[in-house]
Image (cartoon, rainbow, N blue to C red):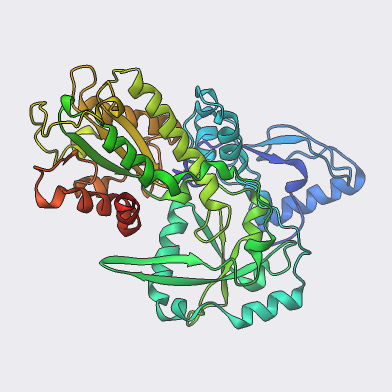
Amino acid sequence: METCYHGGSLPESSLFVVAKDSVRPGGTGDKTESQLKREKERAKKKSLGESVKNPDVNEEHRYTGRTTTKLIKWTGKQPPKHANGRELCLIWHTKGECKENCEHDAAPDIDKLPHPAAPMLHRVMKNGAPVVVHSEPWSQSQLDMRVAQGCHSSANEFKEFLMEEFLDFGRKGFWILLPYDTIKDEKGLRLSPIGCIPQDNRRLRMIVDYLFWGLNNETMKLAPEGAMQFGTAPLRIREALMKANPDYGPVYMYKNDMSDGFYRIRLSTTGALKLGVILPRFEGLPQLVALPLVLPMGWLESPPWFCAFTETVADLTNVDLQQNKRVPPHPLGKAAAITDFEVRDAQVVRPIPKSHQPLTYQRPLKKMEVFVDDFVGMGQDHPSNPLTNQRAVLSHNIDKVFRPNRPTDNQWRKEPQSQSKMAKGDASWRDWGPTASNNCQPKNIIETLLGPIGVCEIQSD
């Protein structure tokens, strides 16, 4: 089983498509004597203008010395080793399952979703998020100076953590590690410092400072900024809770996290060079740099591109919830329900003031909000749409945008829905009401869902 250059796994009988000018018979590298002999014969035929037959190519073609965009089929198990990094990114699988893998985490029918953002999401998943910078490319002297300056002191302090992180990212197809001397001549290369942020009771968070050398300020804003609606999510949650009709019983809430977050969305091949990262110096190794193949933490455009996907999931979920759509149980449903609170009988827990009665919802509450990568569900249990069905609706809509794991996937790929958070009970329904236990009081549950900022927003006014 081989590994796709975009992170997916490929069958042993891989069939690649490579740009014709990407196959370079010249150069030596780590080739065997028989390979060198065949290349000399092909070079001789090329000089005579004769037809050349490559054993790994299933059609004959004539080398004329001109660059062409004609595609040829590469039938070897591995792409040509003498293709450079950018050309390797052009390698594309012609089989259906490979096309899905090369589109990384996208669901195969993402372009057919009943949502106006579907064509854009499909385009980004297929071609990668664009990175356009309006300043001049960096000179070699600028690159050398900034590499010599190195990364943040926090990165030097936690070198072992960073090495483990990038080894894991390499297995998952998120980042590429290269010696600086190997890549320093690539056109458009830019390098930013990396740092580590300590977190209370959590592992370190790695982040790139794309503001340090002004890259964020020089980035053209092409992502849909309107997709970043998480700033008002606490206000919308508060409004929904206030308007919930007590006649339908208490309000329950749950939170479903996405695993790998920004790393679910690919970058364009040219964008990877512009968002390169300087790593700390490791003993016995040359100066290393890292190139992202996915949206990195710290880049200006990462949040809006990612939110475009998660907000689409929330929109699709809300439409299905309002239509009381019934869906089959989700494979992760049992894991999500590990600590569900026992649903109490619907009853009025307190009298409703007459002045407030016209403002309450006339139907049971069933609503989905999203805070970047945290889906926050609110609902009242009712025969028309039970709570178990409401949670399954979200899970199925996540699968429509971010595909679930396949048996042929890389063993390091995680399910889009965080199973580790489910094991902690995050995706379980929690009781919202004055009779709930202390851990489920409004302040504590919002702090769990949205953090201290969410508590301040909910308690404002």
Q: Is residue 187 left or right of residue 66?
A: left
Residue 214, percent from left and from top? 65, 68
Residue 293, percent from left and from top? 55, 53
Query: Closer to the camera, 461 or 226?
Result: 461
Residue 110, percent from left and from top? 51, 29
Residue 226, percent from left and from top? 56, 42
Which residue is outermost to the front? Answer: 355
Q: Quadrant of residue 191?
A: bottom right
- Residue 445, relative to residue 144: is it above or below? above
Q: Is residue 155 left or right of residue 241?
A: right
Query: Closer to the camera, 126 or 206?
Result: 206
Query: Closer to the camera, 235 or 37?
Result: 235
Q: Is residue 204 left or right of residue 227?
A: left
Quadrant the N terminus occupies: top left
- Total numbered badges shown on the rendered structure: 0
Q: Is residue 52 left or right of residue 446?
A: right
